[in-house]
Amino acid sequence: SQQGEEDPQALSIQEGENATMNCSYKTSINNLQWYRQNSGRGLVHLILIRSNEREKHSGRLRVTLDTSKKSSSLLITASRAADTASYFCATDAPSSGDKLTFGTGTRLAVRP
Amino acid sequence: KAGVTQTPRYLIKTRGQQVTLSCSPISGHRSVSWYQQTPGQGLQFLFEYFSETQRNKGNFPGRFSGRQFSNSRSEMNVSTLELGDSALYLCASSLGDREGQPQHFGDGTRLSIL
């Protein structure tokens, strides 16, 4: 079963614009991770935010976590065509035996 | 450092057959997890092995099994294949010795059932 639901399912933006993706989850978590998947490839880990953190940055990525709303967002600033991929949130929750449970993903297309 | 290697990349089988997929984790990683990815169900956790022991298991039937060897390499076996088993099977490795470690994925094995 899916722990995380992502919104929107698909997003198309122009190069240089910012892209925001949201993830909602159902149960308490230890941490939340974001991954990127290029077509036909495996997932690449982007960033991990722990349940006691509210915001984290890595390069052009900014992740926020609101545990009271059970939601997280991933912001990609100044997007590039190479950012075109699917993005997944994944939760590590005590209720699921600490295994990662992935969301449904957001397909991002960045137009040059 | 070499990444996670999965073999084969592509596989075509028929219903009723069985299949074995292989995963070589990053050197030093002791945890290997397996996932099934389909357009309809998304990414679903199959199981995790750590130091040759199954540490975690998802909600898949007993036809799906796995094992891990002393060198941390892992294999996944699916018996009595069904059409619905067509999917991308992904393996991921991590150090596995504490909570909150990122997982490193291979490029998967694309399994097609005819």
Image (cartoon, coloured by chain):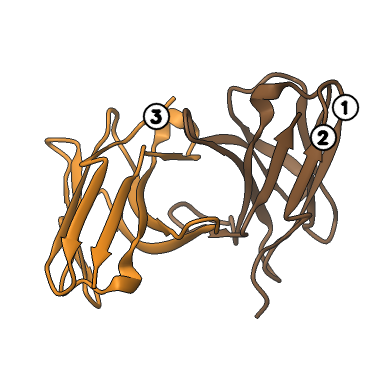
Chain colours: A orange, B brown
How many numbered marks are there? 3
Tell me the number on the disc at residue A2.
Answer: 3
Indicate whether B57 appears above or below A106.
above
Looking at the image, can residue A3 be seen? yes
Q: Percent position (x, y) of residue A70?
A: 19, 36
Amino acid identity at mark 2: Lys
Q: Nearer the viewer, mark 3 or mark 1?
A: 1
Both labels 3 and 1 in a single chain: no
Q: Secondary structure at mark 3?
A: loop
Residue A75, quarter of picture? bottom left
Q: Nearer the viewer, residue B102 or B109?
A: B109
A88 vs A40, left or right, is: left
Mark 1 touches mark 2? (CB < 8 Å): yes
Q: Nearer the viewer, residue A46 or A10?
A: A10
B78 vs A22, left or right, is: right
Quadrant occupied by the C terminus of chain B: top right
Subunit bearing disc 2 = B
Q: Which residue is mark 2?
A: B13
Q: Which residue is mark 1?
A: B17
B99 vs A27, left or right, is: right
Amino acid identity at mark 3: Gln
Indicate whether A32 appears above or below A18.
above
